[in-house]
């Protein structure tokens, strides 16, 4: 389930009506802070929801479902050009919108292809793992996402080439996961996430990226005078980083996703509840962090 406040809010709406869809998409763009509409905001949402909504909500999956979902989300969300390369646009659709599709799926208003397409777009194209609108507890939130990955049709969540690649993986697959906040946890506890990589390099890139991003946040905080150089940096401390390797049956991989502009970052969605302690091991990543410092 989604955040309880979102569930209660969506229960009062009819997602087969365009006006109610506009209210839902607007509210969850700003969740948890409600905001009133401007005429421009209403119109920006009304046009794509009126055009594509009837082909998605209250309609069974069909040949045009995936395309309709992608167009609805991208046009309703809009895009922003990246500062470092204006030729590359980043979707602005908030990942909290997945709660709308999750609710619709639970009520039988959309099919698994529509839901899978929404999950792929909002969890990958819209920028990564974090998904506002989930339960506040991190582990509970990850269990919701695991449920999403199980329910998402592979036809919606993956391209034909990705489905072929997944089918061609060996019976036993080595997967990798890197991150922070791992201090004091055993390997199997750190493994409770659907987001893994097929190679060590990708997992290490995530660690380096998180370290660099957090360092930038700290520098800006120091410049703003809200913290000092003497303050501890627990989020990027070496003791809070981890790198995991797991050897799993291919059946535990729910999806194979090529992300990034040139499909350079591959991730797999893993049914982590079926991981066992003997599958997962902790790999030293201290030298990686020292090189990145």
Image (cartoon, rainbow, N blue to C red):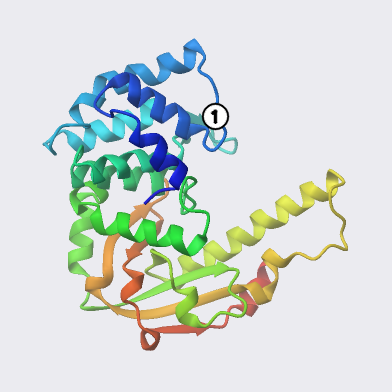
Q: Residue furthest top?
A: 39
Q: Is residue 249 above or below residue 111?
A: below
How far across and how far down the image is residue 205, in percent?
53, 63
State the SS at label 1.
Answer: loop
- Residue depicted at x 49% and y 74%: 190
Q: Mark 1 — residue?
A: 34
How far across and how far down the image is residue 111, in percent?
18, 43
Q: How many marks?
A: 1
How far across and how far down the image is residue 262, in percent?
39, 49
Is disc 1 surrounded by few (<14), some (14 to 19) or many (20+) residues within 10 Å? Answer: few
- Residue depicted at x 54% and y 29%: 34
Residue 87 visible to the viewer: no
Please tell me in which quadrant of the rendered image residue 110 appears. Answer: top left
- Residue depicted at x 68% and y 66%: 236
19 sits to left or right of 61 = right
- Residue depicted at x 34% and y 26%: 21
Q: Residue furthest bottom?
A: 278
Residue 45 visible to the viewer: yes
Please tell me in which quadrant of the rendered image residue 233 appears. Answer: bottom right
Q: Is residue 286 above or below residue 34?
A: below
């Amino acid at each position: 389930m989604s955040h309880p406040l979102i569930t209660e809010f969506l229960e009062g709406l009819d997602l087969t009506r365009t006006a109610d869809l506009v209210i839902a998409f607007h509210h969850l763009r700003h969740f948890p802070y409600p905001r009133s509409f401007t005429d421009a905001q209403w119109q920006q949402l009304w046009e794509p929801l009126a055009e594509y909504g009837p082909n998605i909500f209250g309609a069974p999956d069909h040949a045009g479902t995936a395309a309709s979902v992608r167009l609805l989300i991208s046009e309703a969300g809009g895009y922003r050009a990246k500062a470092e390369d204006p030729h590359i646009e980043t979707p602005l659709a908030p990942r909290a919108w997945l709660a709308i599709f999750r609710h619709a799926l639970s009520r039988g208003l959309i099919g698994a292809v529509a839901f899978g397409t929404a999950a792929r777009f909002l969890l990958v194209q819209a920028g990564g793992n974090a998904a506002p609108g989930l339960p506040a507890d991190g582990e509970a939130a990850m269990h919701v996402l695991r449920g999403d990955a199980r329910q998402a049709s592979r036809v919606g969540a993956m391209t034909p080439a990705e489905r072929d690649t997944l089918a061609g993986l060996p019976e036993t697959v080595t997967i990798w996961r890197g991150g922070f906040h791992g201090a004091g946890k055993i390997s199997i506890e750190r493994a409770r996430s659907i987001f893994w990589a097929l190679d060590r390099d990708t997992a290490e890139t995530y660690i380096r990226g998180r370290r660099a991003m957090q360092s930038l946040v700290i520098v800006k905080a120091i410049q703003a005078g809200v913290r000092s150089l003497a303050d501890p940096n627990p989020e990027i401390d070496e003791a809070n980083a981890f790198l995991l390797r797991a050897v799993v049956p291919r059946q535990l991989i729910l999806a194979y996703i090529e992300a990034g502009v040139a499909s350079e970052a591959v991730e797999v969605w893993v049914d982590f509840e079926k991981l066992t302690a003997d599958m997962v091991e902790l790999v030293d990543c201290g030298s990686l962090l020292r090189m990145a410092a």
